[in-house]
Image (cartoon, grey):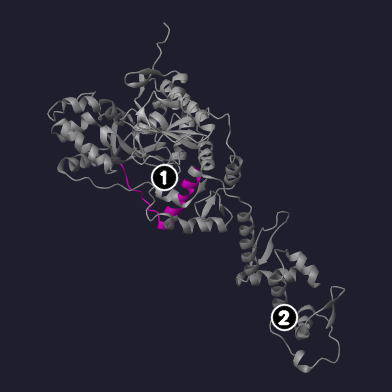
């Protein structure tokens, strides 16, 4: 039926005649049946709710103009509908001003269609592009220096369990141009950073995790419980009298220093005790070879040089306000997003997240629905359940094509900037008899254009290669050789020996020639790079 609303001729359904009369105050034409002209409950509320259900986000002024009513009248009805959860108020339009309203179901549809549109814009990249992205995202090779650079890097690595040997020899120097152990020790001594023992490794090494103290973003693992009478005595001493140097612990607890030191480190690996410096971790590594050769006498007297006893020891305290599971998962997800930029299912396994990807998926989904992150198919071969920080997806697409001028880089095999063996599977090899690469302490990977081109174990002077086929293979081999030369120079290695390449004598083949061109020398034991003597 035709009707006049706000000075315009409109058409409405005839069964809405009474609602338009009572809600908008319009005159009805004569001749309508009595069944259509009876009183209606909440006529204006129904009209405004229908307007909202058939529009996107709108202002009270636009609804009032459409309905020919004062804005204050429409605003009152809109507020009632918000209170009844029929509408949602907020800021929805990019050019909007003031409060806007949207029907809850309309907003749900808009969000779903927007997310679907954003996902459809993403064309997945290949695995090597993810390798290039992670190198750039984690600041590998950037010229940052000083304590601020170290603190920024620790924020990126927060909560990640890393071998001490890799942390200070490879991981931090790869991100801080001039890394000085003193910078990290100073941050620990000032309370800005805390290190937590995770587990002991062979050779005096061990995995630790670093945490930033001031914001408590990453949930710190709670202390465990070390067994044994000496461990209990040390625990009681530190609880009663506070932090102490090792000589004070020996004096107050009594017993053989060697046995006390073993008990102290059992507390470290149980996450009960920490230190205000990383020096005891370093000295254990330095002294390991000599200690294994001569053995250790638990009756020897304490001395300032007792390996692993340096610094001031203290008990770790459990948080006074334990996090609920949702808050803990949320903090973990935020740290993972900052570390990787893009989260695929395998990230949870690489990080050892309890419960795996399913434990953090609800948080990721909620963050996507709120617009904090994006979901899409970013990396080919990893399923459609992938999430990215805003801008990370664009940065990933920007490195879709490799840089032909990029140098190869040597990283610790356990470095999170290398996805190989964790997020990405190790490349397949044609010869199954050769050893498979592993993400172990002391092992190193060589990356070129984001792809894995080499792997070196810790204790075996050999090299496994994963060179591309075709004309780029020799180019990658030469880039790998130059990268190993730079790596040896950075670590000031007196000698770098490669006895075998892919199971064959190192000096043979085209790959060996690439190493000879880079400065290696063929010897009876293989390819050798000697440190050049510095001029007087």
Q: Which mark is residue 529?
A: none
Q: Is residue 257 left or right of residue 42?
A: left
Dot 2, how many residues are within 10 Å of its Cα: few (below 14), some (14-19), or many (20+)?
Answer: some
For residue 370, which quarter of the picture? bottom right
Q: Are marks 1 and 2 in contact (CB under 8 Å)?
A: no
Q: Is residue 232 above or below residue 467?
A: below
Q: Looking at the rendered structure, which numbered label has been put on residue 422?
A: 1
Q: Is residue 179 visible?
A: no
Query: Which sits in the foreground, 1 or 41?
Result: 1
x, y percentage for residue 431?
A: 38, 39
**Which span of residues is magenta-colored?**
315-338
Q: Which residue is mark 2?
A: 43
Would residue 258 appear left or right of 15 to someone viewing this image? Answer: left
Could you say whether the residue bearing mark 1 is in a helix, strand or loop? loop
Specify the quadrant that holds the N terminus. Answer: bottom right
Residue 320 among magenta residues: yes
Q: Residue at x 82, y 79 (%)?
A: 11
């Amino acid at each position: 039926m035709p009707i006049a609303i706000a000075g315009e001729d409109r058409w409405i359904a005839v069964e809405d005649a009474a609602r338009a009369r009572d809600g908008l105050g319009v005159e009805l034409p004569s001749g309508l049946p009595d069944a259509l002209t009876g009183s209606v409950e909440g006529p204006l509320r129904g009209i405004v709710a229908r307007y909202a259900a058939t529009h996107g986000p709108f202002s009270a002024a636009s609804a009032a103009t459409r309905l020919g009513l004062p804005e204050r009248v429409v605003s009152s009805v809109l507020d009632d509908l918000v209170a009844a959860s029929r509408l949602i108020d907020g800021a929805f339009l990019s050019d909007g001003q003031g409060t806007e309203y949207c029907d809850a179901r309309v907003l749900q549809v808009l969000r779903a269609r927007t997310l679907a549109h954003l996902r459809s814009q993403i064309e997945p990249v290949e695995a090597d592009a993810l390798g290039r992205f992670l190198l750039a995202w984690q600041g590998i090779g950037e010229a940052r220096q000083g304590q601020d650079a170290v603190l920024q890097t620790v924020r990126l690595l927060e909560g990640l369990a890393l071998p001490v040997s890799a942390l200070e020899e490879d991981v931090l120097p790869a991100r801080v141009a001039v890394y000085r152990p003193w910078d990290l020790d100073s941050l620990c001594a000032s309370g800005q950073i805390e290190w937590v023992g995770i587990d002991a490794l062979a050779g005096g090494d061990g995995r630790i995790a670093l945490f930033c103290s001031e914001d408590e973003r990453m949930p710190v693992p709670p202390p465990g419980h070390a067994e044994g009478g000496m461990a209990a005595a040390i625990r009681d001493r530190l609880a009663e009298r506070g932090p102490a140097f090792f000589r004070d612990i020996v004096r107050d607890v009594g017993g053989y220093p060697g046995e006390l030191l073993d008990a102290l480190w059992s507390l470290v690996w149980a996450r009960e005790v920490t230190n205000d410096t990383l020096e005891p971790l370093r000295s254990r590594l330095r002294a390991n070879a000599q200690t294994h050769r001569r053995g250790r006498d638990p009756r020897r007297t304490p001395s300032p040089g007792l390996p692993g006893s340096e610094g001031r020891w203290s008990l770790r305290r459990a948080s006074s306000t334990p996090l609920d599971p949702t808050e803990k998962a949320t903090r973990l997800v935020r740290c993972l997003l900052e570390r990787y930029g893009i989260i695929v299912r395998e990230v949870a396994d690489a990080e050892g997240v309890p419960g795996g990807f399913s434990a953090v998926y609800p948080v990721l989904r909620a963050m996507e629905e709120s617009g904090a992150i994006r979901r899409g198919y970013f990396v080919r071969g990893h399923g459609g359940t992938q999430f990215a920080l805003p801008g990370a997806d664009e940065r990933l697409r920007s490195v879709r094509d490799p840089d032909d001028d990029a140098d190869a880089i040597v990283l610790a095999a356990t470095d999170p900037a290398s996805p190989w063996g964790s997020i990405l599977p190790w490349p397949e090899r044609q010869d199954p008899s050769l050893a498979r690469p592993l993400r172990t302490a002391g092992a190193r990977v060589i990356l070129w254009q984001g792809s894995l081109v080499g792997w070196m174990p810790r204790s075996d002077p050999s090299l496994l290669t994963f060179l591309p086929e075709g004309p780029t293979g020799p180019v990658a081999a030469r880039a790998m050789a130059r990268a190993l030369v730079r790596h040896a120079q950075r670590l000031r290695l007196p000698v770098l020996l490669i006895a075998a390449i892919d199971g064959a004598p190192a000096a043979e083949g085209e790959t060996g020639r690439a190493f000879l061109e880079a400065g290696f020398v063929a010897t009876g034991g293989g390819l050798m790079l000697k440190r050049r003597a510095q001029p007087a």
